[in-house]
Amino acid sequence: MAEEASEKGFVIKDRRSAHLGETGGETGGEPKAAPSHQAEETPTGTPPLPEASFMGLLFSIHTGALAALGDVPDPHSAETRPDLQVAKHSIDLLGVLKKKTQGNLDADEERLLDNILYDLRMRFVQLSAGKK
């Protein structure tokens, strides 16, 4: 019996067309394949996106702040242009996250957030002092 199932496989019948006003169900021939998960696939040559997580959010904001501080080139123009106003906003946003998540983070998340905030604040002060 197990051999029959492995040889035969399984068949998925898409009956959505019957609900859309078409009559007769299947149109004959091979059964329709299951709908693909194209929304989850990425175009050829691009890496898949990482899993959504709190640490991923921190890294995303951190990278944006580094770009605004001129430490990382802009991904679109490949230029490094410091923008202290945007950098300050990113740092403030991380400060809000720290305050609002206090007591709800695990040790690794809290340590990462503290280290990112410290690093960005020091870089911001250094860059601000050099501008004046």
Image (tube, rainbow, N blue to C red):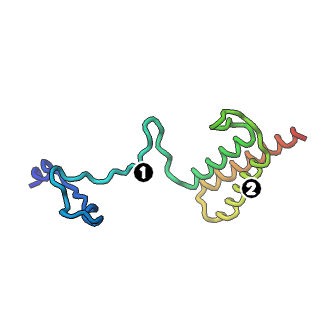
Q: Is residue 122 left or right of residue 9?
A: right
Residue 4, above or below 76: below
Residue 98 at x, y = what percent?
68, 59
Q: Secondary structure at mark 1?
A: loop
Residue 117 picture location, percent across and down: 72, 50
* 18 and 107: which is toward the camera: 18
Task: List x then y, in percent, for residue 93.
Answer: 71, 56
Q: Residue at x 66, y 35 (%)?
A: 77
Answer few, some or many: residues within 10 Å of disc 1's Cα (few below 14, many 20 plus, some between 14 and 19): few
Quadrant of residue 84 in the image? top right
* Figure disc tally: 2
Q: Identify which residue, 59 or 43, lies in the foreground.
A: 43
Q: Quadrant of residue 79?
A: top right
Q: Nearer the viewer, residue 117 or 5?
A: 5
Residue drawn at 83 percent across, 45 percent down: 125
> Left of 73 or right of it: where is 25?
left
Marking on residue 8: none
- Specify the label residue 39 is tagged with: 1
Q: Residue furthest right?
A: 132
Q: Which residue is mark 2?
A: 92
- Give neighbour class at mark 2: few <14, some 14-19, many 20+ (Cα, 10 Å): some
Question: Which residue reaches farthest top?
Answer: 78
